């Protein structure tokens, strides 16, 4: 987007393969993502979208290929390297995954104090700042179960941002929400995109993908089957698989 | 610890006093089982929760072994069995070892079930926030597992209190054994065992009551 000054590569994926048992889920992914780029990943259920995202922050290991985040190779078995990497790559889940035994504030402050050694005082100031940004400053002492789904997801975003990541992975983050709550979450994501955050989001919200993303990636059978700017990709799909996928959405 | 069989008149008070003295051993043995079993059980739980297959397997075998054999046999083996190998154990040491190992296996199993009941998403969220394994366990998973662990843990601890009666086979005159001995001396089984039952209840009730309170506290995520 326009605010991006840094044009270095945020994520570089080369020849990524991954199988679960006999099932090949990632079938040779090559992908370069520039810092500040906003990527929407679309595709049928089971095409490997989640697995790709989960490989990028090491929730899933891969069988072969290479994955670089900010130029550093991902070393799945090196705990220290993973700890460093995960501070740069935040993830937001479909099911929010807030910690139910902690307040909103504690959810946000936990990782910065534990992992980055930030003082409780500073962590709290930062938590408030982030909550203000997602419009939930008054909920700092609430427990997750007292919030609506949309509010919980916004807290989850604030929690991820508290680590000051350079990349944010979003896996269908509005799919578990009631339709009337989708908008408030997407508005937050949009503001992040505008502020130059590198974003990879798996989404079924095609309108949103079209509006916010710089590039849309269509995954099919574990490959990047087609990609391009949203205007061209949605208007002039080149492969029959994408044509079929897009028509399946409208019907 | 000794009750000599004499033919004397035992008043209720004598009966109760002797039983109370014996109840001390029941309490001490129970405490050993709780604390020793709890600590060892927690250690085993951590090992079992890591991704190291060999260690996981070893803990599983340990748990099956101690769950699948009677405590009575474990007490025997700890006391007489070790002696066969030339290791002299006092009744105290043997009871402490057997009760600790036995309780640790059960507690490990109970707690492992509770840890497994925590949704995978909780681990993954913690992992994504760069917490290491022990931080994930300590700050995210165990606090949530503890809440659901209270009722089965207490259920087991109450069993342990009653299970300490088995330590009489290696010479402890704890509550049940004392009850038998006093009955033999007084021929008042009804009175004696009513008192025995009452004392067990007095030991177990506070545990259950405290558990209910604890569960109430842990249950409230919102205040
Ligand atoms: N942990 C797992 N174990 C076995 N198979 C899995 C696992 N996770 C995903 N899969 C399989 O991998 C395929 C791709 O899954 P996923 O990446 O979740 O697809 P998508 O997010 O595009 O729907 C699916 O067939 C799914 O069943
Ligand atoms: Mg998915």
Image: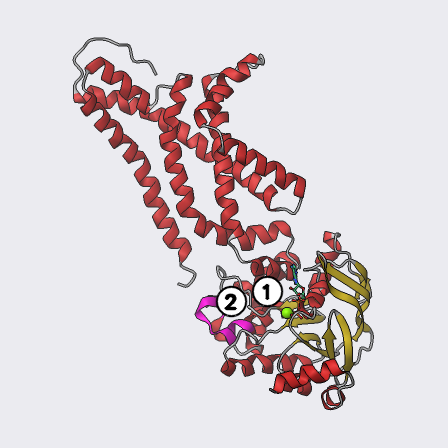
Dot 2 falls on a residue whose secondary structure is helix
Residue A78, position in %: x, y? Answer: 75, 52
Q: Are marks 1 and 2 on the same chain?
A: yes
Query: Along the polypeptide, which appears first: circle 1 or circle 2?
Result: 2
A229 relative to A100 in the view: left or right = right
The residue carrying pointer 1 sits among few (fewer than 14), some (14 to 19) or many (20 or more) residues within 10 Å by Cα, namely many
In which quarter of the view is residue B166 placed? top left
Q: Which residue sits furthest top?
A: B6
> Chain for mark 1?
A
**Residue A95 visible, this orientation:** yes
Q: Name the quadrant containing residue B63.
A: top right
**Image spot of residue B86 (x, y percent):** 58, 12
| Residue A199 percent location from the top left of the image | 70, 75
Instruction: Name above or below for residue A241 compared with residue B33.
Output: below
Query: Is the residue under label 2 in contact with that under label 1 (CB below 8 Å)?
Result: no
The region drawn magenta spans: A140-153
Q: Residue at x 55, y 83 (%)?
A: A183
CA distance for labels 1 and 2: 13 Å
Please check the rendered image and state whether residue A70 is part of the magenta-colored stretch, yes or no: no
Quadrant placement of the C terminus of chain A: bottom right
Q: Is residue A86 above or below residue A49?
A: above
> Which x, y percent locates residue A2?
75, 86
Element type where label 1 sits in the image: helix
- Number of labels in the image equals 2
Question: Could you say which disc has been placed on residue B215 in the image?
Answer: none
Which residue sits at x=59%, y=65%?
Answer: A123
* Marked residue chain, label 2: A
Residue to which mark 1 is pinned? A123
The residue wearing badge 2 is: A104
A207 sits left or right of B92 in the view: right
């Amino acid at each position: 987007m326009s605010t991006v000054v840094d044009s270095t590569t945020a994520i570089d994926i080369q020849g990524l393969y991954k199988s679960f048992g006999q099932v090949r889920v990632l079938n040779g992914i090559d992908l370069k993502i520039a810092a500040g780029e906003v990527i929407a990943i679309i595709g049928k259920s089971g095409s490997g979208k989640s697995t790709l995202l989960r490989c990028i922050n090491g929730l899933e290991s891969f069988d072969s290929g290479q994955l670089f985040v900010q130029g550093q190779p991902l070393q799945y078995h090196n705990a220290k390297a993973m700890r460093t990497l995960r501070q740069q790559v935040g993830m937001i889940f479909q099911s929010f995954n807030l910690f139910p035994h902690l307040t909103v504030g504690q959810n946000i402050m936990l990782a910065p104090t534990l992992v980055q050694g930030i003082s409780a005082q500073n962590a709290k100031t930062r938590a408030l700042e982030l909550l203000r940004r997602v419009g939930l400053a008054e909920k700092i002492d609430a427990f997750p179960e007292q919030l609506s789904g949309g509010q919980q997801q916004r807290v989850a975003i604030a929690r991820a941002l508290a680590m000051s990541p350079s990349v944010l992975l979003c896996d269908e983050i509005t799919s578990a929400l009631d339709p009337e709550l989708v908008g408030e979450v997407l508005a937050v994501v949009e503001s992040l995109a505008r502020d130059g955050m590198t974003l990879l989001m798996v989404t079924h919200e095609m309108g949103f993908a079209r509006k916010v993303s710089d590039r849309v990636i269509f995954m099919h059978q574990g490959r990047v089957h087609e990609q391009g700017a949203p205007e061209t990709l949605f208007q002039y799909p080149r492969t029959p698989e994408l044509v079929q996928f897009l028509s399946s959405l409208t019907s | 610890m000794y009750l000599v069989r004499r033919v004397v008149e035992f008043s209720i008070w004598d009966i109760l006093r002797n039983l109370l003295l014996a109840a001390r051993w029941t309490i001490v043995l129970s405490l050993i089982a709780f604390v020793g079993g709890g600590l060892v059980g927690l250690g085993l739980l951590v090992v079992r929760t890591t991704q190291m297959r060999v260690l996981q397997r070893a803990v599983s075998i340990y748990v099956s072994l101690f769950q699948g054999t009677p405590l009575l046999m474990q007490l025997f083996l700890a006391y007489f069995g070790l002696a066969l190998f030339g290791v002299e154990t006092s009744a105290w040491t043997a009871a402490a070892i057997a009760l600790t190992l036995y309780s640790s296996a059960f507690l490990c199993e109970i707690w492992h079930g509770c840890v497994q009941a925590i949704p995978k998403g909780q681990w993954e969220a913690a992992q994504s926030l760069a917490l290491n394994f022990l931080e994930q366990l300590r700050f995210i998973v165990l606090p949530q597992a503890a809440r659901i662990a209270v009722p089965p843990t207490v259920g087991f601890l109450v069993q342990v209190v009653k299970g300490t009666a088995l330590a009489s086979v290696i010479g402890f005159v704890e509550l049940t054994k004392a009850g038998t001995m006093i009955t033999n001396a007084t021929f008042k089984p009804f009175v004696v065992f009513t008192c025995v039952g009452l004392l067990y209840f007095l030991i177990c009730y506070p545990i259950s009551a405290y558990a209910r309170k604890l569960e109430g506290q842990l249950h409230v995520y919102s205040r």
